[in-house]
Image (cartoon, grey):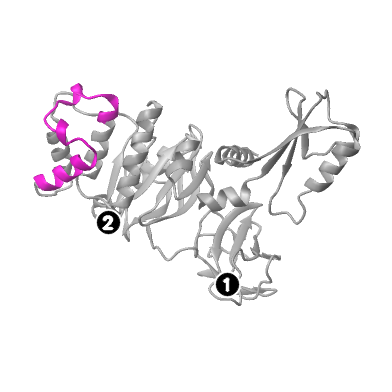
Amino acid sequence: MVQKVGPVTATFKGEVTITDLVPDTSMKIVGAGKGAAGLAKGGADVRLLEKDDPTEPRYDVEAKVGGKLAQLGRSKDEAGLFTFRRGLLGSPKTRGTTNVPDIVEITDLRKSYRGGFEALKSVTLGIREGEILALLGPNGAGKTTLISTVCGITMATSGTVTVGGHDIVSDYRAARSMIGLVPQEINLEPFEPVINTVRFSRGLFGKPSDDAAIEKVLRQLSLWDKKDSQIRELSGGMKRRVLIAKALAHDPRVLFLDEPTAGVDVELRKDMWEIVGKLKRDGTTIILTTHYIEEAEAIADRVGVIAHGELLLVEEKAKLMTRMGQKELEVQLTQTLTEVPANLRSDALSLAEDGSALIYRYDTKAERTGITKLLADVAAEGLVLRDVVTRQSSLEDIFVNLVKEGAV
């Protein structure tokens, strides 16, 4: 069935093609049927964004479903032609911004329990080969459930997952051979030597004995000098390295790290970041779940935010901070105020806790920031400036705001 709405043609059996959007304008695409997921739920608002780089012939395209970002991609040509593939609208996904293929493809994944609780709600996600993707979310958000489902530990209620093109259900052996999993818990045999522990994990995947491969993994993780030590003799940090070595023993292309630095000290956390960075340089695709914002900010290429079983957003870390981050202007005063003067009151302006400064929040992408007017109004009130300081929103600020919005 093909339905035409304005300049949009929606083919519900497969895709929705935008043919002539005007830059920085929005339009609604609607339809009935299930072929283009999300359209039957009230439609999608699609917008062609202005170019950051005027030499780039294509445009970035943004689609929102229910006011939330559903997809961010890039038009195929300068005319603005853009195709939303089946199963993408209605769940966050970034496409078209890179030629790197997706090694893991998750489509409309759901997990519910007998009592009616939904741990995963129609999650759709593409994970690019060779990237580090950080899944951020509070405790109970669904991060571990998502990883467990992809790795075959938990059975999904519905939806599909492929790893390297292999379906995790119909072709599970091939799919699981490409996956390494580092769980949250340290579950190691305490009296077994390190090298035997790693050899055993390799054998579980039907791999032939290969001492050279085991040595390479242990050296990669700075464990070679501990190869003959019993697990019980190792520190907590070393035990976590052994978990990673076990996960890498069968040469997987995808590594899942479930809360890899939970409960460890700051120094060990930074050591783990270095290990993850080294694995990426060696070509491993890494997905880590965490509720440590600084962890995602330090090592991730892309960030996904998950809350209440829903994937709220997936985007390049730098682009996310640029697009959603706000700046703060702190106008420090020589005198102390008890409240914001009546002539200055606005939703964007607040008073610092100690009353010594005015805090003004503004969007750097807005046509006018309002800073010039604010400073003029401050001077007109007879207030004397001591200093002016600007601050960029952190990933933590953005994360908190997204989770709050997702709870509404």
Side (left or right) of 370 relative to 246 = right
> Which residue is labeled 2 in the image?
171
For residue 210, above or below residue 45: above
Magenta run includes residue 236: yes
Cα gap from disc 1 to disc 2, whole angstroms: 44 Å
- Which image quadrant: the N terminus? bottom right
Which kind of residue does numbered mark 1 sit on? Answer: Thr
For residue 257, above or below residue 254: above
181 or 91: nearer the viewer: 181
The residue sitting at 62% across, 46% down in the picture is 325
The residue sitting at 24% across, 39% down in the picture is 221
What secondary structure is found at the residue carrying circle 1?
loop
146 or 155: nearer the viewer: 146
Q: Quadrant of residue 171?
A: bottom left
Q: Which residues are magenta?
A: 211-239
The residue sitting at 46% across, 39% down in the picture is 142
Magenta run includes residue 87: no
